[in-house]
């Protein structure tokens, strides 16, 4: 079994990338890169529409936290605790507790799955009222009849000439009312 274990480190929210780069650079400068194997910021891709354009952005699973695979000793503990932007390890007591192997495997698996297919930023529920923003039914109001998050599509019941008609739309084509 490897001596490397995963630890959760608390950072300033929004500074995870900068903290990761600083930690990696400081470990190299101090000659301690053999103690820190990997620094991970778990993210997922999220699709959203802004100003009529579909964009894919990255969203952090755990804002304000990074995961570090390391050998914990006095040198590595001191390096982490004294890196700018880090407020400390997560855990109770004097010594931080490592993550369970099953927990880190789940996080890595979840990140890999979500990297492949961007998830819509907005979540819709059946029965919710929406307005169609784009397409042949623009400016029509309707009620969500079905939600298909895997495909990023909705079935919306729109009233056309007094009759309820099902229309399949993509998430970005509608907005909540």
Image (tube, rainbow, N blue to C red):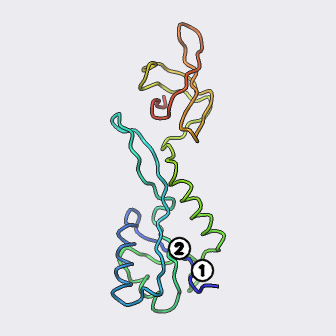
Q: Secondary structure at mark 1?
A: loop
Residue with the most extreme bottom position: 74
Which residue occupies 37% across, 80% down? Answer: 83
Measured along the vertical axis of the image, is residue 177 above or below residue 24?
above
Seen from the viewer's position, the closer of residues 88 and 120 is 120
Which percent across, then down, holds residue 134? 41, 25
For image coordinates 35% across by 69% down, the residue present is 18
Where residue 46 appears, as percent x and y from the top left, is 46, 48
Q: Is the residue 109 above or below the residue 163 in the image?
A: below
Q: At numbered mark 2, what does the secondary structure look like: helix, strand or loop?
A: strand
Q: Which residue is mark 1?
A: 97
> Label for residue 8?
2
Q: Residue 88, position in %: x, y?
A: 47, 78
Foreground residue, 31 or 78?
31
Residue 82, compared with residue 99, is above or below; it is below
| Inter-mark Cα distance, 2 to 1 | 9 Å
The disc label shown at residue 3, or none: none
In the rendered view, does 125 fall on the left or right side of 41? right
Give the mark nearest the N terminus, 2 or 1: 2
Q: Quadrant of the N terminus?
A: bottom right
22 on left or right of 173: left
The residue positioned 50% from the left and 72% from the top of the image is 67
Direction from residue 149 to residue 22 in the image, left or right:
left
Tell me, yes or no, whether the two marked residues, 2 and 1, touch with CB atoms within 8 Å. Answer: no
**Residue at 50%, 43% in the rendered image:** 120
């Amino acid at each position: 079994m490897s001596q490397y274990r995963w630890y959760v480190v608390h950072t300033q929210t929004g500074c995870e990338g900068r903290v990761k780069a600083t930690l990696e650079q400081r470990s190299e400068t101090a000659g301690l890169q053999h103690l820190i194997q990997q620094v991970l910021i778990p993210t997922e891709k999220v699709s959203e529409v802004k100003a009529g354009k579909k964009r894919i952005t990255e969203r952090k699973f755990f804002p304000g936290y990074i995961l570090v695979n390391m050998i914990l000793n006095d040198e590595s503990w001191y390096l982490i605790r004294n890196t700018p932007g880090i407020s400390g390890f997560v855990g109770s007591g004097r010594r931080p507790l490592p993550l369970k192997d099953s927990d880190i495997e789940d996080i890595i698996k979840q990140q890999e799955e979500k990297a492949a297919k961007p998830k819509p930023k907005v979540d819709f529920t059946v029965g919710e009222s929406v307005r169609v923003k784009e397409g042949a039914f623009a400016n029509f109001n309707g009620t969500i009849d079905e939600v298909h998050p895997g495909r990023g599509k909705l079935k919306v019941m729109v009233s056309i000439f007094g009759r309820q008609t099902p229309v399949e739309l993509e998430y970005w084509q509608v907005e909540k009312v």
